């Protein structure tokens, strides 16, 4: 605290003295005068002012000297000098404005001081004027030097700018030249690159054309090779067909000697095809190989047609000879019977009476058989059933095998047949041809693909026979189960059946025997009841089914027979699988034979009317195209005579089939035409 008080006392304000009693002791007048008198200037103050002016001028001189030696840039620094001059002017002005008022009470000292002060003031003003003039000269000189220096600096800067500009222009020129040079070089590189790429493109295009030509050549070779293989297979089938015709001919004694030679020639031609294919695989396929194969195929086909014609002529001669022998035998038997009858008249009445019942029974039996089936039809029926039994026995070992491997093999054969037949549809002609070719390959013993596996029927001696029997049963079963519900499905199945039949006549015989076995009315054959035959066996022989000891209902029986009959009729009316120039294996002429046979038999209730209607619905249009007015006459006979006989044997309340047949015949005769079958395949469908 004490140090603070001491510091305050030592300050300027602390040294001031205050008089609280100034208004006392009669000092009031003195204080008022002191306060109201003008200020006075001491001599020391004037000297200090003059000294300040001298210092300012000397500072200006030193500044001039320093600044004149320091000028080096385009702009001269004169700011300090100007500041000094302004300061000097302010000092002079303040000095000139000083006024001294000398109190009249002060005396002569103050007057002297006043004169002295004026003298000093005058000297100061003169000194200031001199200094100002000197400063003006210095400023003028500095300005001139600065302007000159600025001009030199500007000239130097301009020279530098020109030099930089020239240097920049030279650099730009070099850069432009370098850019042009690089551009030309790049252009030349691009041109060279373009030429090289053009050459590469041309070379690539050349290679592409070569590759395409090579692929085209390979594709052509592949097609030619495939065509050769197909032709080889077809020639193999033709050779097998020729051997079958020759071996199955029952009248070889009537065959010309050339038939055997032609069969041998066909075998040689088949061997030639093997050589052609071998050469093709070794040296590549050419059109020359194809021409050779076509020539071999044409020659083989020509041989087969000649063999077929000669075999047909031989069988016709055999039939004529057989008929002639039968006629001679019948005439001899008739003569013998007449002689026996004449001799019998000479015998006694008792012996004659004993022989009469026997003769009556024989006559009745023959008459009953003739009313149920035609004699020639019965012979064909029995011959076909005999072939069916023989085929059945030939593959019995495979059918009843206990060997696990053979069972598996048998199952694969069944799958090959069933899968192919089950997938038959009217999707396209190509589809049906593929089914025909697959079944033909299977029956030929060639490998076929079944569920991504190759299987061949020739692997087992009874494999082909087993497949033929299985295929015949499967086709007839399709009529029983599928066609009976969908009549349109008969036509694609019939096309496949006819296609296989055309290549394998022995299969056709088995198929026909199977049709007759399941539906004997297609013979036609009304099988009579045999002595001692049970009712169940009798119905089964006629085509009925028995379930739990009960016979099949009539409507279901008729529906199944309709499906089987329509499938058989569809085979008759379908086009020849090999084209119109080749004979049908079992054509429409068999429908005419069936009608002539059934019209000579006594009708049975329901079944006769049903099958006649189905046969007309499917084959009627094709028969009219072939037989014309004769067929219309046949329809007239049917409605005038035969329908009446059917009505006579039809029980009351079950006349539906006969009424349907009668209505159909009346419509056909009213228009003299039979409508085409619904759902039949178009013309040339197999080639579409």
Image: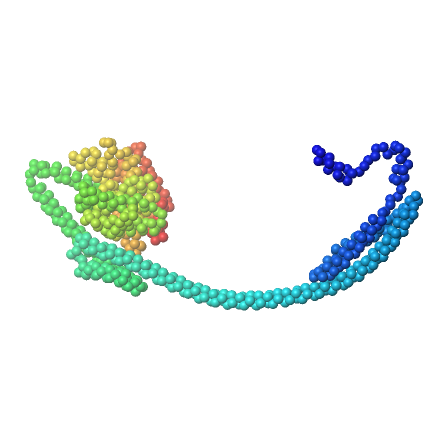
Q: Position of residue 47 (x, y in %)?
A: 83, 51
Residue at image coords 6%, 38%: 348
Can you see residue 652?
yes
The extreme right residue here reads 104
User: Where is 42 relative to 152, above or below?
Assistant: above
* Front-most of residues 214 and 417: 214
Residue at image coords 27%, 62%: 282
Quadrant of the image containing the N terminus: top right
Q: Position of residue 515 (x, y in %)?
A: 25, 43
Query: In the rendered image, which quarter is residue 284 located in?
Result: bottom left
* Front-most of residues 340 and 265: 265
Residue at image coords 85%, 32%: 21
* Front-most of residues 681 and 172: 172
Can you see residue 638?
no
Q: Position of residue 684 (x, y in %)?
A: 35, 52
User: Where is 491 relative to 69, above or below?
Assistant: above
Query: In the rendered image, which quarter is residue 148 located in?
Result: bottom right
Position of 488 with respect to 459 (left or right) is: right
């Amino acid at each position: 605290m004490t140090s603070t008080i001491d510091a305050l006392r030592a300050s300027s304000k602390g040294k001031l003295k205050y008089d609280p009693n100034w208004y006392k002791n009669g000092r009031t007048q003195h204080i008022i005068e002191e306060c109201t008198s003008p200020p006075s200037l001491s001599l020391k103050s004037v000297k200090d002012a003059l000294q300040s002016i001298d210092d300012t001028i000397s500072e200006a001189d030193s500044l001039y000297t320093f600044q004149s030696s320091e000028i080096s840039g385009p702009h001269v620094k004169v700011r300090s000098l100007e500041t000094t001059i302004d300061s000097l002017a302010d000092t002079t002005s303040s000095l000139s404005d000083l006024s001294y008022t000398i109190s009249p009470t002060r005396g002569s000292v103050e007057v002297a001081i006043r004169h002295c002060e004026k003298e000093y003031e005058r000297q100061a003003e003169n000194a200031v004027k001199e200094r100002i003039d000197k400063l003006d000269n210095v400023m003028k000189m500095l300005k001139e030097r600065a302007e000159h220096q600025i001009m030199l600096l500007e000239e130097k800067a301009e020279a530098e700018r020109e030099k930089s500009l020239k240097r920049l222009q030279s650099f730009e020129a070099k850069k432009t030249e370098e850019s042009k040079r690089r551009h030309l070089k790049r252009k030349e590189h691009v041109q060279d690159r373009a030429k090289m790429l053009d050459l590469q493109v041309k070379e690539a295009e050349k290679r592409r054309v070569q590759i395409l030509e090579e692929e085209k050549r390979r594709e052509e070779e592949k097609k030619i090779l495939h065509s050769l293989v197909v032709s080889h297979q077809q020639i193999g089938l033709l050779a097998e067909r020729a051997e079958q015709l020759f071996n199955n001919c029952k009248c070889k004694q009537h065959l010309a000697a050339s038939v055997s030679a032609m069969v041998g020639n066909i075998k040689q031609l088949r061997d030639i095809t093997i050589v052609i294919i071998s050469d093709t695989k070794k040296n590549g396929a050419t059109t020359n190989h194809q021409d050779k194969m076509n020539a071999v195929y044409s020659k083989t086909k020509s041989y087969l047609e000649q063999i077929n014609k000669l075999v047909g002529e031989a069988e016709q001669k055999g039939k004529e000879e057989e008929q002639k022998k039968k006629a001679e035998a019948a005439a001899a038997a008739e003569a013998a019977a007449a002689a026996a009858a004449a001799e019998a008249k000479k015998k006694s009445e008792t012996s004659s009476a004993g022989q009469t019942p026997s003769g009556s029974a024989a006559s009745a039996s023959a008459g009953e058989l003739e009313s149920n089936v035609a004699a020639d039809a019965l012979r064909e029926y029995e011959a076909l059933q005999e072939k069916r039994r023989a085929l059945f026995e030939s593959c019995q070992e495979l059918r009843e095998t206990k060997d696990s491997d053979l069972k598996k093999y048998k199952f694969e054969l069944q799958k090959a047949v069933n899968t192919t037949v089950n997938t038959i549809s009217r999707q396209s002609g190509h589809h049906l041809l593929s089914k025909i070719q697959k079944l033909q390959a299977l029956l030929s013993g060639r490998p076929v693909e079944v569920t991504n596996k190759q299987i061949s029927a020739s692997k087992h001696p009874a494999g082909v026979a087993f497949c033929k029997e299985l295929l015949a049963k499967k086709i007839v079963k399709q009529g029983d189960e599928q066609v009976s519900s969908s009549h349109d499905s008969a036509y694609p199945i019939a096309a496949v059946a006819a296609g296989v039949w055309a290549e394998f006549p022995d299969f056709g015989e088995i198929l026909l025997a199977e049709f007759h076995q399941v539906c004997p009315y297609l013979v036609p054959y009304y099988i009579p009841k045999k002595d001692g035959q049970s009712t169940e066996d009798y119905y089964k022989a006629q085509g009925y089914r028995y379930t739990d000891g009960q016979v099949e209902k009539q409507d279901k029986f008729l529906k199944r027979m309709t499906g089987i009959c329509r499938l058989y009729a569809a085979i008759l009316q379908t086009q020849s699988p090999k084209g119109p120039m080749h004979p049908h294996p079992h054509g429409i002429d068999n429908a005419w034979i069936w009608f002539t046979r059934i019209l000579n038999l006594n009708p049975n209730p329901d079944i006769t009317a049903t099958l006649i209607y189905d046969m007309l619905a499917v084959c009627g249009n094709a028969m009219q195209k072939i037989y014309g007015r004769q067929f219309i006459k046949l329809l007239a006979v049917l409605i005038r005579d035969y329908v009446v006989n059917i009505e006579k044997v039809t029980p009351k309340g079950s006349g539906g089939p006969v009424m349907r047949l009668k209505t159909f015949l009346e419509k056909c005769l009213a228009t003299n035409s039979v409508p085409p079958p619904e759902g039949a395949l178009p013309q040339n469908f197999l080639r579409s």
